[in-house]
Amino acid sequence: MKLPKIAIGQINARMGDIEKNGQKIISFIEKAKMENVDLIAFPELSITGYPPKDLLLRRDFLEKNKKIIEEIIPYTRDIGVILGFVDFKKRKSFKGLNLYDLSARYMKERILYNAAIYINNGKIEGVQYKIFLPNYDVFDEKRYFESGKDIHIFKLNGLKFGITICEDIWVENGPTKHLRKKGAELLINISASPFYARKSMLRRELLSKITEELKIPAVYVNLVGGQDDLVFDGGSLVYNKGKLIDMAPRFKEILYITELKDKKPSIEEGIDEVYNAIVLGLRDYAKKNGFKHVIFGLSGGIDSALVAAIAVDALGRENVKGVIMPGPYSPEESEEDAKQVALNLGIESILIPISEIYLKYLELLGIKRDEVKITEQNIQARIRGNILMGLSNEYGALVLITSNKSELAMGYSTLYGDTAGGFAPLSDVPKTLVYQLARYYNKKQGREIIPEKIITKTPSAELAPGQKDEDDLPPYPILDRIIHLYVEEEYSKQEIIEKGFEKEVVEWVIRKINQSEYKRKQVPLGVKITPKAFGFGRRVPITNFYDV
């Protein structure tokens, strides 16, 4: 069997920009033809972007997605092309539909399929529908799509191959075995698989198992790029007989050519993959939504220092502004530390002290007590939030909030204060991981960009005299472990206690997580880097009396 020369079109699709996605696909096809490629495969829903969500309810969106394929076909002379798109058919039966539900109007007219089309030498050879539709975490495909029923074998210069779409290879006894029984000599899977830490390892384990069992090669084609809170990390894979023989770069749009021969690919995972995911997520969110500049509060703490570093890598130092806003309880060293971070990174810093504004607020509100209670603390945070939003209007910059996952879990933040902004790069990053990322960044740079004294200083919101995070929260190593078990692993209160944690601490942490749901619903989205982030993938009621 002569194996084909295959190109992986690992593209960064723009959501809903069907025309531009089509143009990119054509340019990749043309480049592949210049390299004498036999077949080029693009990711799942590469025509529309993934996930298109309720854009799928629009008739014009669906029709345009099909029409662009007609424009691509003439460019497929002398090459095979696999594309992900949305196919639809007129509905023949209305059985089981609520015909009075106007929000489901599209369902009355047509059936939608998550599909892959195979075009060879200017001719459509066939279409494969996705069979297993994910409906968990961030996936909601059963809301829109019907499951495919049939499994097809396609041919390329006499070679028989099968096409599966993302979830179809993750299902035990799924389509891959049936394709092998039908004579497939090659498997191609087109995916839009969102990133979380160590997800690439799971993909590799899966492809190894499949190809070891079936004794045929498999090409896994993944999407790349940021889309709202999701990051697609690319890293397309080629396996044969259980062995990784080739791998496209991660976090990078690329036309990657493989001849199904062992290239001994390097593997990127661990802290570096998390950092790169956050950088790509911020870069694409800003650029795809029309923001060239970002702005944020630069406090002299580790969270804002890390956000500054990420922003520079994502957008360039000339597009990053840090605003230093010392208040009545900010130590002088915090202002100095913030200025040092700005200097080390080469970003512009703006100094706006808030003490006079704060005192005016207290006067207007008639607050005369000496003790600094929650009201006074929140006023300081909201003054800073107002300043950042004003500067956002002035500069046309995207405001980044610097809160981490630990703080958001506990509600250790101020609505319309330090949660005011448009994007939260660290919203899925626990505090303990913030420290690891800061040290990783310095190591990557080969010098101390984020000062060691910032990394080692005791965390503080600096909203009251002598305030420290540890006065209000359990130590972060304990807190983060409990949050992980409760939120990501979905352990019960009793199960967490049985892990060796103090009963009172576990009960307090879980109560705070549940009480803070209303706050998180009003926090801007950020980059998902864990299996379960606060956001679309975790839909918990705000008003909720369930006692875990």
Image (cartoon, rainbow, N blue to C red):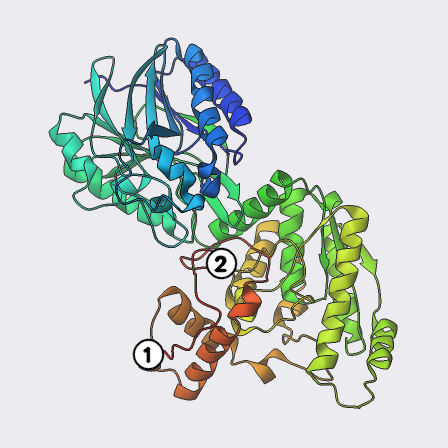
Residue at image mark 2:
535
Q: Disc 2 on helix, strand or loop? A: loop
Q: Is residue 495 left or right of residue 253?
A: left
Q: Residues within 10 Å of mark 2 (few under 14, many from 20)?
A: many
Q: Is residue 359 left or right of residue 510?
A: right
Q: Residue furthest bottom?
A: 370
Residue 191 at least partly seen: no
Q: Position of residue 278 (x, y in %)?
A: 54, 50
Q: Residue furthest front?
A: 100
Q: Position of residue 29 (x, y in %)?
A: 45, 18
Residue 137's image quarter? bottom left
Residue at image mark 1:
499
Q: Disc 1 on helix, strand or loop? A: loop
Residue 93's image quarter? top left
Can you say whether 416 is above or below 546 in the image?
A: above
Q: Say which residue appears at 40% left-offset and 39% top-offset.
A: 192
Residue 334's image quarter? bottom right
Quadrant, the N terminus: top left
Q: Position of residue 32 (x, y in %)?
A: 43, 17
